[in-house]
Image (cartoon, grey):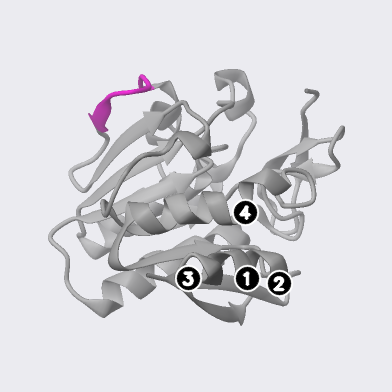
Amino acid sequence: MKREFLETGDGSVTIHLPDWNEQYHSKHGALNEALHVFIETGFNHVLQQEPLPQLHVLEIGFGTGLNALLTLLSARNHEQKVRYRAIEAYPVSLDEVSKLNYAELLKCSSEIFNGMHEVSWGKNHQITDYFSLYKEEQFFSEISAEQEFHLIYFDAFGARVQPELWTEAIFKIMHQALMPKGVLVTYSAKGSVRRAMQAVGFTVERLPGPPGKREMLRATK
């Protein structure tokens, strides 16, 4: 599938898929969206609930690696150990990664960002003192974890182009993967998505969305 590179509203670059008229991040600001949805409303929220010796995070859609990079930096800032597992069926190529400007905008090492993409799949890697990464190349429906994670970043492509990723069947897998009181955050606020989450047992909150989006969802087990 053809891929193009698009500068978003905050100056950060995302990958655009013209065949689907879809992009990996919000055109209003890839960086601002990820910070708001996954870090402020997910990572920071979970840490405020109770102290954790190690925070276990599952990302649904590793994609460009932006969410993982922001979590790595947040883990360092909070001195919080994080075990990060990322699921991706169609990895971004290293050539495509070289066109992304997240490390530059965040004023962090491009070697760390590139390294997260370069490390092997199916093996745990200690990227920094506070952050370990395990990437798995598989479909979301194949996840079999049970009560393993405190937090899920649900960052799949939108329901308009991949409705099969936003169903009760998928959210049941997510519910099973979370520990009790675990949290799932996503940029989506569709009524059908909220109802699918509620149908499998989640308590769902509508929260203010990132720039360009009125609402987002946070679901708690």
| SS category of the residue bearing label 3 | strand
Give the distance between the C-alpha atoms of the residues marked 2 and 1, in whole angstroms. Answer: 6 Å
Residue 72 in percent (x, y) is at 34, 49
Q: Identify the residue at horizontal 79%, vertical 51% (top origin).
A: 160
The span shown in magenta is: 119-125
Q: Residues within 10 Å of mark 3 (few under 14, many from 20)?
A: many
Give the distance between the C-alpha atoms of the residues marked 4 and 2, in whole angstroms. Answer: 12 Å
Residue type at mark 4 is: Thr
| N-terminal label among 1 and 4 | 4
| N-terminal label among 4 and 2 | 4
User: Would you say the residues marked 1 and 3 are in contact, meaning their CB atoms lie under 8 Å apart?
Assistant: no
Instruction: Specify the quadrant that holds the N terminus.
Output: top right
Residue 81 in percent (x, y) is at 20, 53
Residue type at mark 1 is: Arg
Q: Return the residue at label 1.
A: 195
Can I make out residue 190 in this image?
no
The answer to whether 163 is drawn above or below residue 119 in the figure is: below
| SS category of the residue bearing label 2 | helix
User: Would you say the residues marked 2 and 1 are in contact, meaning their CB atoms lie under 8 Å apart?
Assistant: yes
User: Would you say the residues marked 2 and 3 are in contact, meaning their CB atoms lie under 8 Å apart?
Assistant: no
User: Would you say the residues marked 1 and 4 are in contact, meaning their CB atoms lie under 8 Å apart?
Assistant: no
The image's mark for residue 167 is 4
Q: Return the residue at label 3.
A: 219
Q: Return the residue at label 2.
A: 191
Give the distance between the C-alpha atoms of the residues marked 1 and 3, in whole angstroms. Answer: 11 Å
Can I make out residue 117 in this image?
yes
Residue 102 in percent (x, y) is at 55, 44
Q: Residues within 10 Å of mark 1 (few under 14, many from 20)?
A: some
Left/right of residue 66 with respect to residue 128 in the rendered view: right
Q: Residues within 10 Å of mark 2 (few under 14, many from 20)?
A: few
Q: Identify the residue at horizontal 21%, vertical 48% (top origin).
A: 130
Front-lying residue, 133 or 155: 155
